[in-house]
Image (cartoon, rainbow, N blue to C red):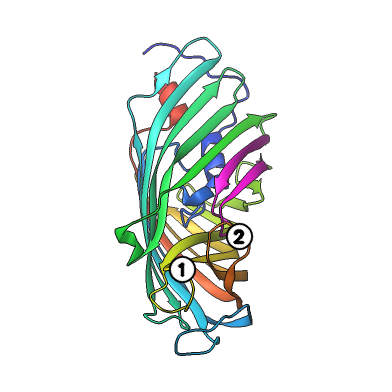
């Protein structure tokens, strides 16, 4: 075992902290990328939001066979994996002390109950492949860069999917044992349309048990470590996407393919229980509010809306499981 000097001021749990900011328990972060790339792992989750009526409904053009009233609810299942691409590279000197490459793959299946659509509930699918790199510098800065391709389709458009680009770059700079500052940018569908976003945030560890983390304008979360195995979490975050839908005669005189775009704010609380060294279970509940749904001719949010609606707030529930293997970047350095 050779001696490896860790960069100074590397806060304990820095990798976990950045993961807490960027990855919600629903594993739906920037462009739906699970950014918890610091340890190889497999994840599974199931979330559900019951039907809620539209409180506002405008721009509703003629629907085949009906009017504009309706409800919206969804149940979503997700699978994901972070796979290391080669070994963790560690250096005893130089500006870069450690780096690692990983691949992130994911698949989500959603049953979306838009009651004004024919063939409702619609089966929606999204997923993607991203390549990510992690770099830890001699000044304790942790860099995360990720890019790849994804899709978001319904049952019929899945036969000819349209790939879309996704990217994320974030740097974490620890200024003290309690404070770490984050900044970067992303190209995301988090707000229900293709959108480049600047990212600014922080990690604050006021005590050994508390961690508060935020990246604006996506999420803020707080975690309290109650015991060695149990963590209580609270958070608020933006969730959204833009799916291609087969028109299938629903909207006369519109393109054969339209877009279902949604965005909502979720306020949640839950627990995470570490069963063993490799298995963690989690459950959370809360409310989805500030909800907005658009059926449009494109995914850019540049007009051409066919229908605009705002479902009432609704409860949201989620359960998940995470199986980890191997070590994260700091653990690998300490073991060398």
Q: Determine the residue positioned at 52% across, 36% down.
A: 15
Indicate whether 63 appears above or below 261: below
Image quarter of the C terminus: top left
Q: Nearer the viewer, mark 2 or mark 1?
A: 1
Indicate whether 130 appears above or below 76: above
Q: Position of residue 190 (x, y in %)?
A: 56, 55
Image quarter of the N terminus: top left
The reply to whether residue 275 is in sight is no
Q: Which residue is tagged 1?
A: 255
Indicate whether 182 appears above or below 220: above
Q: Which residue is tagged 2?
A: 301
Among numbered discs 2 and 1, the one appearing first in the sequence: 1
- Could you say which is closer to the camera, residue 149 or residue 277? 149
Q: Position of residue 199 (x, y in %)?
A: 65, 42
User: Is residue 180 rendered magenta in the image?
Assistant: yes
- Could you say which is closer to the camera, residue 87 or residue 151? 151
Give the residue at the far front of this rendering: 253
Magenta region: 179-205
- Is label 1 in a helix, a strand or a loop? loop
Q: Determine the residue positioned at 53% across, 10% down.
A: 94
Q: Quadrant of residue 302?
A: bottom right
- Is label 2 in a helix, a strand or a loop? loop
The reply to whether residue 229 is in sight is yes
Q: Determine the residue positioned at 47% across, 38% down.
A: 147
Q: Position of residue 196 (x, y in %)?
A: 61, 46
Q: Quadrant of residue 140?
A: top right
Indicate whether 48 appears above or below 220: below
Q: Determine the residue positioned at 56% across, 14% down.
A: 95
Q: Position of residue 118 (x, y in %)?
A: 40, 82
Crowding at mark 1 (Cα within 10 Å: few <14, some 14-19, many 20+): some
User: Is residue 7 rendered magenta in the image?
Assistant: no
């Amino acid at each position: 075992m050779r001696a490896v000097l860790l960069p100074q001021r590397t806060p304990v749990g820095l990798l976990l902290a950045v993961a807490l900011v960027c990855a919600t328990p629903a594993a739906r972060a920037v462009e739906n990328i699970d950014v918890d790339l610091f340890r190889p792992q497999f994840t599974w989750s199931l979330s559900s939001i019951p039907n809620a009526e539209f409180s506002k409904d405008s721009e509703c053009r003629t629907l085949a066979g009906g009017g504009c009233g309706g409800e919206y609810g969804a149940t979503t299942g997700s699978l994901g994996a972070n796979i290391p691409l080669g070994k963790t590279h560690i250096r005893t000197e130089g500006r870069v002390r450690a780096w690692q490459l990983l691949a992130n793959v994911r698949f989500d299946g959603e049953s979306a109950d838009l009651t004004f659509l024919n063939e409702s509930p619609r089966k929606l699918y999204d997923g993607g492949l991203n390549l990510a790199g992690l770099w830890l510098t001699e000044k304790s800065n942790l860099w995360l860069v990720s890019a790849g391709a994804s899709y978001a389709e319904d049952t019929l458009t899945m036969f000819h999917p349209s790939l879309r680009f996704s990217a994320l770059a974030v740097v974490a700079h620890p200024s003290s044992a309690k404070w770490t500052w984050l900044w970067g940018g992303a190209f995301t569908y988090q707000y229900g349309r293709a959108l480049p976003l600047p990212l600014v945030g922080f990690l604050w560890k006021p005590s050994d048990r508390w961690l508060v983390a935020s990246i604006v304008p996506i999420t803020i979360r707080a975690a309290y470590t109650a015991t060695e195995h149990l963590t209580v979490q609270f958070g608020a975050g933006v969730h959204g996407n833009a799916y291609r839908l087969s028109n299938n005669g629903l909207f006369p005189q519109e393109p054969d393919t339209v877009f279902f775009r949604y965005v909502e704010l979720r306020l949640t609380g839950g627990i995470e229980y570490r069963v063993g060294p490799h298995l963690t279970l989690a459950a959370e509940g809360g409310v989805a509010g500030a909800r907005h749904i658009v059926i449009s001719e494109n995914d850019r949010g540049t007009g051409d809306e066919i229908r605009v609606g705002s479902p009432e707030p609704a409860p949201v529930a989620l359960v998940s499981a995470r199986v980890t293997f191997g070590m994260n970047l700091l653990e690998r350095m300490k073991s060398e």
